[in-house]
């Protein structure tokens, strides 16, 4: 199958570690960046020449270098370079149109590049191929908390395999997220599998202007509507199916989600710091002595030139801070 890797996000909720000039998917974590891990994962479904990367034009060299570092090459025309980010639906649509122009109708797997995902996902994704002939398939994670940063999926009629989706709700507010967790909804993992025909049909139906903009070759990206696949398509479409994905997954989108997968000491603290009478704190710092006394539930993030102190419960609001900085410039 063909794979589209989405690698154009700015990762604002991880400021000051993730910057517009070098977003989180390209930051090295241990030996590889999340983008490189995604490339290696994609090879389990595809040949290198069947992988397409959609990213900002400023990131093209990072993309090419990080792929080369792994010993692979990507044809230049398979790196789709956006002049401006318009969120995930235009990015996916561009990838799908490019694939169809080169190879005709195809089975397509879309990977975000900001996740960690256990290898057990490979079999689950492969087993969903029959389901993707008629539906856009999303992969549902068992929620561990009422997190407002995710899409929520209500499984409906059982298919074999998987379920039809009764309701898809992107980023609900906290009371609604709590209710969804109680009611057995799943989190959207951000991985999508579909046949190009189904995806194009549904996009044409629910986002006709966007669809039209791609009808005569590559569009003027600046003039496109900015919309995510979640808000723009999955909340509307009646042809969405879900496969439960019961493997280790984390989107590492916020300091809260990074904290959740890190090892903690007996008081729930993690990071290079001394902690006295403090619980459930997350510290990131290099070459600096850090001490926390009598505080709970904080993210303390030092990037050298910037320092963020934030309640872990407010991790989602880091994006508002970045927006404020960008608006000020
Ligand atoms: N090319 C391109 N252009 N890629 C983009 C753009 C863009 O304008 N915007 C975001 N991306 C990439 C990001 O780099 C990331 O790899 C992926 O698309 C998803 O975008 P996010 O911005 O990280 O989305 P999210 O985390 O808020 O929400 C999505 O993922 C959640 C799971 O992690 C949604 O699909 C949620 O429903 C889902 O729960
Ligand atoms: Mg994300």
Image (cartoon, grey):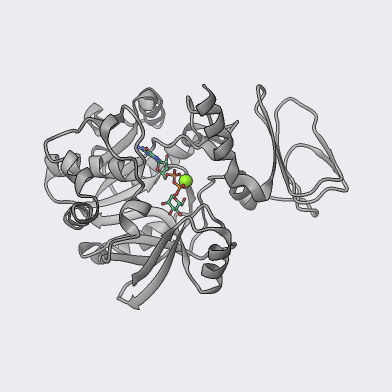
Give residue 194's position: percent from left, percent from top.
Answer: 25, 57
- Image coords of residue 321 (percent x, y): 59, 35
Of residue 164 and residue 266, the one placed in the foreground of this image is 164
Left or right of residue 205: residue 163: right
87 is higher (above) or lower (below) than 120: above
Query: Image point 25% across, 62% down: which residue?
Result: 132
From the viewer's perspective, is residue 300 above or below residue 203? above
* Residue 297 in picture, x, y percent from top left: 74, 49
Asked whether 97 or 43 is in front, the reply is 97
Residue at the image point whose x is 50% and y is 37% from the top: 11
* Side (left or right) of 179 relative to 231: right
Q: Quadrant of residue 276?
A: top right
Q: Residue furthest front?
A: 328
- The residue at the far bottom in this view is 157
Judge by depth and name the residue closer to the eye, 286 or 295: 295
Question: With respect to residue 218, does 243 lie above or below?
Answer: below
Question: Which residue occupies the foreground of this view, 58 or 310?
Answer: 310
Count every numbered label the image shows and give the total. 0
Q: Quadrant of residue 75?
A: top left
Where 311 sits versus 206, above or below? above
| Residue at 65% from the left image edge and 27% from the top image edge | 303
Residue shown at 53%/45% (left/top)?
253
In percent of width and height, residue 286 lies at 70, 28
């Amino acid at each position: 199958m063909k794979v589209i890797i989405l690698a154009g996000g700015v990762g604002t909720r991880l400021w000051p570690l993730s910057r517009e000039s070098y977003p989180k998917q390209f930051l090295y974590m241990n030996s590889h960046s999340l983008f490189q891990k995604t490339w290696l994962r994609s090879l389990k479904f595809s040949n290198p020449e069947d992988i397409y990367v959609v990213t900002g034009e400023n990131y093209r060299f990072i993309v090419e270098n990080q792929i080369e570092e792994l010993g692979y090459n990507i044809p230049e025309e398979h790196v789709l370079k956006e002049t401006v980010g318009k969120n995930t639906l235009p990015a996916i649509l561009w990838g799908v149109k490019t694939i169809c122009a080169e190879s005709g109708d195809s089975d397509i797997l879309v990977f975000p590049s900001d996740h960690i995902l256990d290898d057990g996902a490979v079999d689950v994704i492969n087993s969903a191929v029959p389901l993707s002939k008629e539906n856009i398939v999303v992969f549902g994670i068992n929620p561990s908390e009422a997190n407002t940063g995710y899409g929520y999926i209500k499984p409906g009629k059982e298919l074999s395999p998987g379920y039809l989706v009764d309701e898809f709700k992107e980023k609900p507010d906290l009371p609604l997220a709590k209710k969804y967790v109680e009611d057995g909804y799943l989190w959207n993992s951000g991985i999508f599998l579909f046949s190009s025909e189904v995806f194009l049909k549904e996009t044409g139906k629910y986002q006709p202007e966007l669809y039209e903009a791609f009808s005569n070759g590559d569009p003027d990206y600046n003039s496109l509507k900015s919309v995510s696949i979640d808000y723009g398509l999955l909340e509307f479409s009646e042809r969405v199916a879900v496969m439960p994905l019961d493997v280790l997954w984390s989107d590492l989108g916020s300091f809260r989600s990074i904290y959740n997968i890190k090892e903690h000491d007996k008081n729930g603290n993690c990071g290079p710091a001394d902690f006295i009478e403090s619980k459930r704190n997350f510290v990131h710092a290099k070459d600096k002595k850090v001490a926390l006394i009598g505080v709970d539930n904080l993210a303390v993030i030092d990037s050298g030139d910037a320092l963020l102190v934030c309640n872990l419960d407010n991790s989602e609001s880091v994006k508002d801070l970045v927006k404020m900085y960008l608006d000020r410039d």
